[in-house]
């Protein structure tokens, strides 16, 4: 083996060891940092391996023929808070975004301020997004797509083929560990049913959200742009466990460490209950006591007991766990029988 070949092997081994350390650190972060900081700190770890100037990630709905892509949950590194809102204004004309979302699992790279749309080109120039490297993944359990975009400015170097390969492999690990986190927090066994859930921080910012829950929130709050729950919902998070009504829908709020699990309650069997009975049953299944329910709804404890007794009979259940299941609540909410 000549000197050049030895140097190439040594360089490859050095890169492999560096990537291995990066993935090991990602695994540690998944266990110690929790959902609120995991993706950001994971990308900061990757930044030591593949430097970048700024980054953006989150969940996005794919674009349709007449519907532009929409980011429903997003985080950012070294970008302004207004970034997602600015991007949404030109999202329908962003050819790079359309290309990325139509080719899930592939790393898409581009350099230059070349978008034919004046608005999109001005947006890229304003934030110095001269070099971009992006990947998206399908999230069938949520009904949305997961994406990560990394940027370098005009003075930076283009992303190389090696950068792209490392980025692709790293993001597969990042995505899997994030999905495991979300599934563990929601405590839902199926890979198909996370469209009705969200994981929110106490300030209302989203760590995860499903497409069906997004649709319900947007229906009640037209123009909602995602990422942070509407204030009418976020102000209720501190009260979890609790149940709130959102138009025709019911949301269950379940505390989980520094997060709150937001779930869309399915009406199904609960539709046989009178509205007042259903409200009492939802609150009881969510963990509230007789006295708390009575105080919150301005009822007597005896009336609360009567409503619950009727609910048990009409739904054919015998415990709080069965009651929560019949009401379509998150399995983590119903904790014990009365």
Image: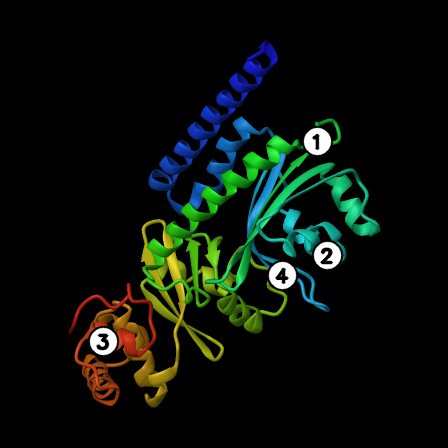
Direction from residue 30 to residue 94 in the image, left or right: right
Closest to the observer, 139 or 243: 139
Local crowd size for mark 2, using a 10 Å CA cut-off: few (<14), some (14–19), many (≥20): some
Residue 8, given in percent of the width and then of the height, sits at 57, 18
Local crowd size for mark 1, using a 10 Å CA cut-off: few (<14), some (14–19), many (≥20): some
Element under disc 4:
loop
Residue behind mark 3: 322
Closest to the observer, 92 or 9: 9
Q: Is residue 57 above or below residue 271?
A: above
Q: In which quarter of the image is residue 153?
A: top right
Residue behind mark 1: 158
Quadrant housing the C terminus = bottom left
Q: In which quarter of the image is residue 138?
A: bottom right
Of labels 2 and 3, earlier in sequence is 2
CB atoms of marks 1 and 3 within 8 Å = no
Quadrant housing the N terminus = top right
Q: Is residue 83 above or below residue 60?
A: above
At x 37%, y 40%, the residue is 33
Local crowd size for mark 3, using a 10 Å CA cut-off: few (<14), some (14–19), many (≥20): many
Residue behind mark 2: 89
The CA span between labels 4 and 1 is 27 Å
The CA span between labels 2 and 3 is 46 Å
Residue 303, given in percent of the width and then of the height, sits at 22, 85
């Amino acid at each position: 083996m000549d000197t050049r070949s030895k140097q190439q092997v040594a360089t490859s081994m050095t890169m492999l060891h560096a990537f291995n350390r990066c993935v090991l650190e990602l695994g540690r972060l998944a266990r110690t940092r929790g959902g609120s900081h995991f993706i950001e700190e994971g990308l900061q770890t990757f930044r030591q391996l593949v430097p970048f100037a700024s980054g953006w990630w989150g969940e996005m709905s794919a674009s349709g023929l007449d519907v532009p892509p929409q980011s429903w949950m997003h985080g950012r590194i070294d970008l302004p808070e207004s970034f997602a809102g600015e991007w949404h204004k030109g999202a329908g004309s962003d050819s790079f975004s359309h290309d990325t979302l139509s080719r899930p699992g592939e790393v898409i790279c581009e350099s230059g301020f070349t978008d034919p749309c004046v608005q999109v080109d001005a947006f890229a120039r304003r934030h110095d997004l001269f070099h971009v490297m992006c990947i998206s993944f399908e999230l069938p359990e949520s009904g949305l797509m997961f994406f990560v975009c990394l940027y370098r400015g005009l003075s930076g170097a283009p992303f190389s083929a090696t950068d792209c390969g490392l980025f692709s492999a790293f993001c597969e690990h990042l995505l899997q560990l994030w999905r495991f986190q979300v599934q563990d927090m929601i405590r839902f066994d199926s890979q198909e049913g996370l469209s009705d859930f969200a994981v929110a921080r106490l300030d209302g910012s989203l760590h995860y959200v499903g497409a069906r829950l997004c649709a319900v929130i947007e229906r009640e709050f037209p123009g909602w742009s995602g990422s942070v729950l509407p204030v009418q919902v976020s102000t209720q998070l501190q009260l979890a466990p609790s149940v709130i009504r959102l138009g025709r829908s019911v949301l269950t709020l379940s505390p989980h460490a520094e997060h709150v699990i937001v779930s869309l309650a399915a009406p199904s069997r609960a539709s046989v209950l009178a509205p007042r009975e259903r409200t009492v049953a939802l609150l009881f299944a969510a963990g509230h006591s007789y006295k708390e329910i009575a105080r919150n709804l301005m009822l007597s404890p005896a009336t609360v007991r009567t409503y619950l007794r009727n609910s048990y009979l009409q739904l054919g259940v015998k415990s709080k766990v069965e009651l929560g299941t019949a009401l379509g609540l998150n399995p983590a909410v119903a904790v014990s029988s009365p």
